[in-house]
Image: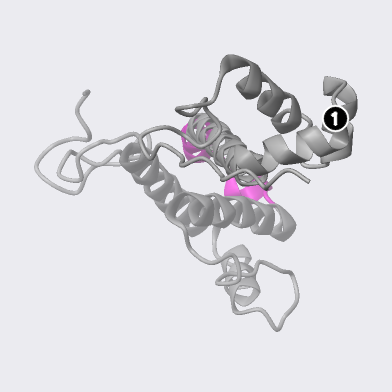
Amino acid sequence: MSPTPTPIKLDPALPPWEQQPGETPKKYGQFITYRDLGRARTLPRAAELLQRHPVTVRKASAEFRWLERAEAYDRHLDKLYEATWLEERRKAAEADARILGAAIGKVAQRLPSLNAQEMSAGDVIRLMDVAMRHRRALFGDPTETIVVTSEAASPLAGKLEEFAGLPVDQRNARLAELAATVTRRVRAVEGANDDDEEAYPAGQGSGGDGEGTGGE
C-alpha cells in the first residue's frame, strides 16, 4: 500500500479555491470538477466524472486538500450571495422611499382643499391612520406606538371623535395644520433646510412679517 501523500501548503496570498503552488493544471482541473459539484459533492461522484479510480481521487483529495478548499469556496459564494441581496434590498428601499415621498407630496397638496364638513368620522380616522403610518415609516417610530381605531378605548379615537364634533371652521383649521405638518416632513425628507421658510396652506399667512412662503 502506497503511503498517504503529504497535504500541500496553501498559499496565504491566494484564495484557497484558486490554483495553488505545486498544483498542476491537470490536478487543479480535477479539483474544480469536485468543487463545482456543489454542497452535495462527494468523492465517488467526482471519481465517476473524472473517470478515475476512487482510491486515486481520494489520494488527490487528501494531497490537495479538496474538502477544505471546497468549503472555503462555499463560504465565499455565501458572502457574494449575501452582498448581492443586500445591495438589491438597498436599491429597493431607495426606490420605495422615492415613491413614498412623491405620494406624500401629492397628499400634502390635496389636504388644504379638503372640506372637513363633507368628511365623516371614519374618513378622518382613515386620513389620520395613513398620515401616522407614513410618518412611522419615514422616521422609524415603532409601529406599536400609535394605534388608530374607532373603539372608544383608543385615546386617538377619542381625539378624532372630538375633532368630528368641532365646528366646520375649526375642523378646516385643524386640517390646514395637518397639511402644513405633512409639507414640512416632505421637505425634510427631500433634504430641505430646517431654517427655510415653512410651507403654509393656500390662504394662510405665515403669522410673521411676510405674507406666506417664498418660492425656492
Residue that carries the numbered disc 1 in the rendered image = 47
36 relative position to 84: left or right: right
> Which structural element holds mark 1?
helix
Task: Specify start and end residues of the magenta stretch as a single range.
Answer: 105-119
Instruction: Answer yes or no: is residue 38 visible.
Output: no
Residue 141: percent from the left, percent from the top?
48, 63
Give neighbour class at mark 1: few <14, some 14-19, many 20+ (Cα, 10 Å): some
Q: Is residue 97 above or below residue 27?
A: below
Residue depicted at x 55% and y 65%: 166
Residue depicted at x 60% and y 79%: 155
Q: Tell me where residue 162 sits by quadrant.
A: bottom right
Q: Judge by depth and name the residue closer to the eye, 216 or 205.
A: 216
Q: Is residue 208 above or below residue 41?
A: below
113 relative position to 204: left or right: right
Instruction: Answer yes or no: is residue 106 visible.
Output: yes
Of all residues shown, which one is farthest toward the bottom? 153
Q: Tell me where residue 143 sits by quadrant.
A: bottom right
Residue 216: percent from the left, percent from the top?
21, 23
Q: Judge by depth and name the residue closer to the eye, 130 or 21.
A: 21
The residue type indicated by label 1 comes to Ala
Q: Is residue 163 above or below residue 52?
A: below
Q: Main secondary structure of the magenta part?
A: helix
Residue 126: percent from the left, percent from the top?
68, 54
Q: Judge by depth and name the residue closer to the eye, 76 or 160.
A: 76
Q: Tell me where residue 86 sits by quadrant.
A: top right
Q: Judge by depth and name the residue closer to the eye, 211 or 26.
A: 26
Residue 179: percent from the left, percent from the top?
44, 45
Residue depicted at x 33% and y 37%: 187
